[in-house]
Amino acid sequence: MCGRFTFQPNDNAEIKRIYQLAVDNGYEPKTGEVFPTDQTAIVKSGDNQVQVVTMKWGFPGFKQDQNIINARSETIMQKPMFAESFRNRRCVYPTTGFFEWSEDKVRHRFNYGTDPETLYIAGCYKVFDGEPHSVLLTTAPNDSMIQIHDRMPLILQKKQIKSWIYDQKFAIDFLDSPMPMLENVPLNN
């Protein structure tokens, strides 16, 4: 399960460009550490090309103040809460890494390396009461993650973003893709 990630435009030129696209479109994405319910930068379909907007991270849950932030890639097409969104409104979370906590409560940062590289996470979204909300997709962990957590984000390469958003066959096939190996950096806080 991915419960927090980073969006650091000051430390990453690609994220800075994405951030600026959101700002140019009239949005103010949360920067730094992003928490559930924050307005986060999202790449989604536009009229002729992808566009960067912000959305609240998490679907409203079944209980008051409940927030569902992740959807399992293995069951997304069967779950009524997510299936229609996955079929019709896929999106991508641009990040500079994500966090997980081990059983002994140590926080670990994951990315391709120790620098805040751009890491894209697959997602989908839906409009609730006139406001778009998004969830990110998780999958079974690979060897770089399994010692820390039993889930990991469904990670896309930059060249796969348009296919994920616009090509349903690609998106369905990608649900079972092996994930890239990531660097695990234990943090003290």
Image (cartoon, rainbow, N blue to C red):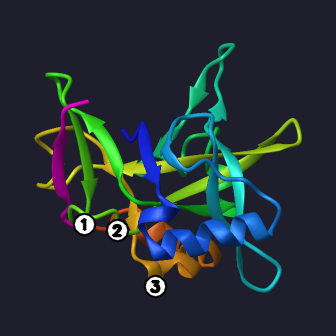
Rendered image quadrant of residue 2 = top left
Q: Which residues are magenta?
A: 178-189
Kindly identify the residue that appears in the image at 40 percent across and 69 percent down.
Answer: 118
Q: Mark 1 — residue? A: 112
Q: Nearer the viewer, residue 115 or 40?
A: 115
Side of 32 relative to 39 (left or right)? left
Side of 116 relative to 38 (left or right)? left
Under mark 2, the amino acid is: Glu
N-terminal-most mark, 1 or 3: 1
Residue 79: horizontal and vertical position, in percent?
Answer: 56, 40
Kindly identify the residue that appears in the image at 23 percent across and 50 percent down.
Answer: 141
Disc 2 versus disc 3: distance between alpha carbons? Answer: 15 Å
Q: Mark 2 — residue? A: 117
Kindly identify the residue that appears in the image at 43 percent across and 47 percent down.
Answer: 5
Q: How many C-alpha atoms fall within 10 Å of the one at disc 3: few (<14), some, or many (≥20)?
A: few
Q: Mark 3 — residue? A: 159
